[in-house]
């Protein structure tokens, strides 16, 4: 206790030196937090963009659909299921969809396309196709019409108002054929379907494929994605003995998560290099502080203070410094974190187009999760304590006579 109080007093005997040291370590914390924060924030945007446009945080589907996405593996959208998902407080929104494939034809031109039946009024906050329309209008609920991509329009040589034929295989082998007017043309790469699908109302899609009242998936958006596994367990209990199941976003987006993990490794390597620089900086700072106090340590030892007590005193001083520096660094990082969350860096031009191709908002914002911030602070604190090797080694090998003589 006495050593702790003495260490605290020693820190402020030379305020300038202490403040310089605190500033350098705190700056290291801020740099580490900013670098990692932007990286994790970008991952969060990628995940949320994908979840809101395709899989959702939890998705209800036929138990065989994940391994074999066949039209035979669809399920009834029963009133009981609708009520079950509507009353759950964890669910923020839900998107019933019917997805399949068909041949799109106009005169002599034909092309295979993904077909997505959806609820236009619900998808405003998910797919947001209405914001990507270059021609025509968005679908109204129950309206008989199609939304197609610009690429498909060019390939088939169709224009707004033309009628396009969809032909394919329906539920239980029935022939699926229908003729629909083109209500809108959009410019949007819906990567969840590998390109530019044809969108139509859910009821029209069910009618086209002879799958009345059925869905291929029911995507659930939660208030917090961390609740997805808990909700999955609840739903699996409800679905026991039925042909449907519930999958979390991690299972549905394994490829995306693998890509993020691979990119994260490269980011951690960069931060590792930063930590290496930070560690040497802290090591040099503490070594300089110890070298400046060689005479002080010699006088203390000459007056009867054992070296082990001097070592303990310097160790406590260093821990005080590290603790103060980390707290200051975190306090500085918090407003920076909040600012770049609410005011992200916006991209334009080709960079913005690249982001849009992956359903990601063309911005770079910092993550709001405090866990990574604490991790960075702990790493810098650990580096500071490891750097104690410098002053402790100097004290243990101190030549008292030479130090008193200023050598």
Image: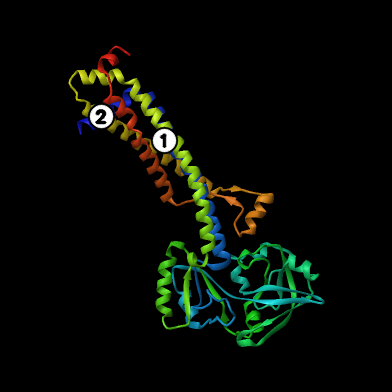
Q: Residue at x 56, y 79 (%)?
A: 215
- Residue 357, horizontal then vertical, whole percent: 64, 58
Q: Residue at x 22, y 29 (%)?
A: 308
User: Image check: 67 left or right of 205?
Assistant: left
Reading the image, the residue beneath label 2 is 311
Task: Decide which of 147, 310 is in the foreground and name it.
Answer: 310
Q: Residue at x 28, y 25 (%)?
A: 395
Q: Is residue 198 above or below residue 179?
A: above
Q: Is residue 32 above or below residue 304?
A: below
Q: Quadrant of the N terminus?
A: top left
Reading the image, the residue beneath label 1 is 279
Q: Count every numbered label the image shows and give the total.
A: 2
Q: Quadrant of residue 230?
A: bottom left
Q: Quadrant of the C terminus?
A: top left
Q: Residues within 10 Å of mark 1 (few under 14, many from 20)?
A: many
Residue 368 in sight from this viewpoint: yes
As helix, strand or loop, the secondary structure at mark 2 comes to: helix
Q: Residue at x 44, y 69 (%)?
A: 89
Residue 224 in sight from this viewpoint: no
């Amino acid at each position: 206790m006495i050593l702790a109080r003495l260490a605290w007093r020693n820190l402020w005997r030379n305020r300038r030196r202490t403040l310089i040291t605190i500033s350098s370590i705190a700056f290291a914390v801020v740099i580490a937090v900013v670098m990692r924060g932007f990286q994790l924030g970008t991952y969060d945007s990628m995940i949320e963009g994908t979840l809101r446009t395709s899989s959702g945080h939890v998705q209800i589907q036929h138990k065989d659909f994940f391994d074999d996405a066949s039209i035979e593996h669809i399920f009834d959208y029963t009133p009981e299921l609708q009520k079950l998902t509507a009353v759950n407080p964890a669910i923020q929104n839900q998107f019933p969809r019917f997805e399949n494939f068909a041949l799109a034809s106009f005169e002599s031109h034909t092309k295979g396309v993904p077909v997505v039946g959806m609820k236009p009024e619900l998808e405003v906050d998910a797919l947001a196709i209405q914001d990507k329309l270059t021609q025509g209008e968005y679908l109204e609920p129950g309206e008989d019409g199609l939304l197609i991509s610009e690429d498909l329009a060019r390939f088939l040589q169709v224009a707004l108002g033309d009628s396009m034929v969809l032909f394919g295989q329906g539920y239980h082998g029935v022939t699926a054929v229908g003729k629909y007017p083109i209500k809108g043309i959009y410019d949007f790469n819906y990567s969840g379907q590998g390109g530019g699908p044809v969108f139509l109302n859910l009821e029209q899609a069910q009618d086209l494929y002879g799958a009345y009242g059925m869905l291929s998936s029911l995507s659930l958006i939660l208030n917090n994605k961390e609740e997805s596994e808990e909700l999955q367990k609840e739903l699996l209990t409800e679905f026991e003995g039925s042909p449907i199941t519930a999958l979390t976003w991690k299972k549905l987006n394994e490829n995306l998560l693998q890509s993020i993990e691979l990119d994260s490794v490269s980011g951690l390597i960069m931060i590792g290099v930063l930590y290496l620089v930070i560690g040497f900086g802290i090591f040099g700072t503490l070594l300089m502080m110890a070298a400046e106090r060689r005479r002080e340590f010699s006088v203390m030892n000459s007056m009867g203070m054992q070296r082990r007590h001097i070592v303990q005193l310097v160790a406590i001083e260093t821990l005080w410094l590290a603790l103060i520096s980390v707290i200051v660094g975190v306090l500085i990082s918090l407003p920076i974190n909040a600012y770049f969350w609410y005011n992200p860096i916006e991209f334009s031009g080709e960079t913005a187009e690249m982001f849009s191709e992956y359903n990601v908002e063309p911005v770079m914002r910092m993550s709001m999760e405090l866990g990574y911030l604490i991790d960075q602070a702990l790493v810098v604190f650990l580096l500071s304590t490891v750097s104690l090797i410098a002053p402790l080694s100097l004290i243990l090998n101190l030549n008292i006579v030479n130090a008193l003589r200023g050598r």
